[in-house]
Amino acid sequence: MSSPRSLTRLVAPMTGPVDANSALARTLRHYGIFAGAAYLVFLPFLLPAMAQARAVSASWWTPTAITIVVVPGLIVGLYGALSWDPTWLRRWARVGTLGILVAVALWWVAWNGTHLDDATVFWLGPFVVLGSICAMIAWPPTVAAVYLLAIAVAIRLTGNVAQSFSGTATMLTDAACSAAFAVVPLALGISGLRTAAELDRTEATAIALAEDTAATTARSAERTVARALTHDEIMASMLEADRNPDSAHLPRRAASALEALDSTVRATNAGLDPDAARVATTIADAARHNDPGIDVTTAVRAHDSSTYPVNAVAALVGATAEATRNCYRHVPADRPRRCHISVTDHRVTITVSDEGGGFDPAATPRERLGIAVSIRERMRRVSGGDAVITSRPGAGTTVTVSWRATDIPAAVNTTDLLGIRSTTSRRLGALVVAVMAASAVATPGAVAWWVPVVVIAALAASTALLVTGDSDRPPTLPTLIVAATPAFMCGVYLFSLDDGTQTIPLWVTGPPALVVSILGMRRRPYAAVIGFLAALVVVGAWSFVREGSALPGILLIGPSGGFVAISIVFARVNRTLARNLIDARSRATHAAADAAAAQAAAHERELQLTPVTALARPLLLRLADGDRVDHATRTQCRLTEARLRDLLRARGLCTPDVDEAVVDARRRGVAVTLLDDRGLDGNDTDRPPPLDDATRRVIVDALDTARAGTVRIRTLPPARSMAVTVVTEDDDRCEWIDIDRAGHVRSMVTEMAARHPR
């Protein structure tokens, strides 16, 4: 159960101004349509009663009552149907609820004292239910509940007097029964409004969380891909230029790395169109760009309205680019290479295959990140993404990357969407049975003692079946039992009457409609209608036996058919509306997440690749031209590879002053190693806060002092007492510098001459 504070948060949006585009406004409009339809459904049943009321009251009362009772309800329906201002819809609903009370009060002024026919109901009677529907639209739940009790007492008291039904017990039990019938749609309506208010209240939080999660995942994925590109493509080219400058493969490797870098950088600003044809074209362009000789085919079998998440398309493009890049790099130009792209409404599949030498995927070194990160990991991070790599030596390679929709709106779970099997509903069911039992005790009628017992027991059994079960749609046997209960209750009571002229109490004529209405709400509308018709047949047969005409008996419970109809419609509206609202928020959340992911991915790629591009692109251009690699170029390649390695392993240490000192030391022949182990390189940031000025000065001084040997600079995890260690070592000495969390510096020097005599 919700706490009082949480209920206050839920009810608050239902009492103040309503945003016209909110879920609450949409729910109010649907309820307005339902209220107007309910008024229209009941009107034909009430025309005979209106005519008789006109005959026993002043001529002005009936048109006045219709104006202040019926017209506002129809206007509420019109406001809902035309999606007009929900604030005015509420105001007209308030006019309708107050109009019912005014009409009841004016009856006492207009009534001429002549009693209504026993076979004709007081025509305001059904407005206990109809007024409750308007009340749930117009007022907060507490006020609506109080209104329900007030209108039930006022209408039943007035109707009983007008029909000459005497006795306080009869009036009170009839009022209690009327309130019990009306509490069902009231409770369902309030539940629907609270659901809508909760959706509105949490929508911003849900979207923000989805955006943050998607952006975090996108940044992490792009960071991984950028690192794989830097390590497997660019650094590998630099190392080959330094170690084997005369390699015949060097220009091709450099050109491949340059194309990979340029295509990834272009993807930062290009954006992706979610249209199916454009998705296929974008993927095909990526394949041809990375392997100009590949044979690309496409098959688009999707509707024009189909859309695809931007982050999923970006992952497919990136994985396809990596797969075709591998084809271009490893498969001889004369061997066939194919790429097939299939796009359907809810799935995109790309198959890249070649007839090259193949390889053993299980034997691929873990440090080779192209397949593991740029393909498998990239697709794994996308909801619905998958990647399968099939290869063996001598048999070629096939890479299949795919995405399938995992959030199709039709898949929303609607089990017990109305909460009919909830704890609250069970309590309401027990309350209704208790009210009927109390009414049976107070006004049993001219029947044997066992008749009310059997009738109430049947009502209790059917109620238990209605508020329990494993699914929203009850099984066949319980459905048949519940559908037969109204006819059984009416038959047992009516055919047991000793006095055929007595008035039939409401606890007998009311439950048939209530029972089959709830059955209809549980997605058994046909069984509900058949059950109510069976009850009509039984009551009509009893009336025919007693009076020679079935009509008086049918009119006894016939007007309740309107309650059955509006309950079935109301349940369908509520269920459909709740599903649509949940789907709409899900789509809005996914759209916001996709946009956030695309923006974060573009920003992260730019952040990662801007320094890489500035450092490596000029060298890659020079190497791809195929010119001779001289000593100066080899040196620059070696230094650039080391700088790129620093960016991968210690980005937090790469500040301008430290970078300058590192480059100068390496030019002097010092082997510098930077490691950042602070553990801050998580999903949401890969640039830990820079070290303080004093620490950086210690590091720069150590680098400037070193003339040969090695310098190892490491930042330690937060749990360590030391923050930074700097180890400078050459043939003669080793200096170990520790900097603790408070900034205190401790230095220890070990002379190496004694340990390594010349």
Image (spheres, grey):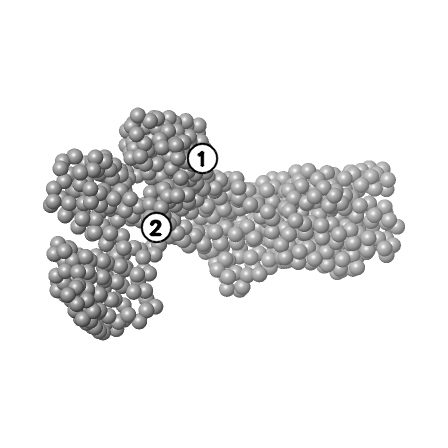
* Residue 286, quarter of the rendered image: top left
* Residue 147, quarter of the rendered image: bottom right
| SS at mark 1 in the image | strand
Point 26% across, 57% down: residue: 650
Give residue 2's position: percent from left, percent from top.
Answer: 55, 61
Give residue 69's position: percent from left, percent from top.
Answer: 59, 47
Q: Nearer the viewer, residue 339 or 25?
A: 339
Point 88% across, 50% down: residue: 498
Give residue 381's position: percent from left, percent from top.
Answer: 40, 46
Point 13% across, 44% down: residue: 633
Whichever of callouts 1 and 2 sits on the residue coming sooner in the sequence is 2
The amino acid sitting under disc 2 is Ser
Q: Which residue is mark 2?
A: 220
Q: Nearer the viewer, residue 655 or 70?
A: 655
- The quarter of the picture where the C terminus appears is bottom left
Horizontal side of 51 relative to 195 (left or right) equals right
The amino acid sitting under disc 1 is Arg
Q: Tag 1: Cα neighbours inside 10 Å, few (<14), some, or many (≥20)? A: some
Q: Nearer the viewer, residue 69 or 403?
A: 403
Q: Tag 2: Cα neighbours inside 10 Å, few (<14), some, or many (≥20)? A: many
What's the mark number on residue 347? 1
| SS at mark 2 in the image | helix
Gap in angstroms between the C-alphas marked 1 and 2: 24 Å
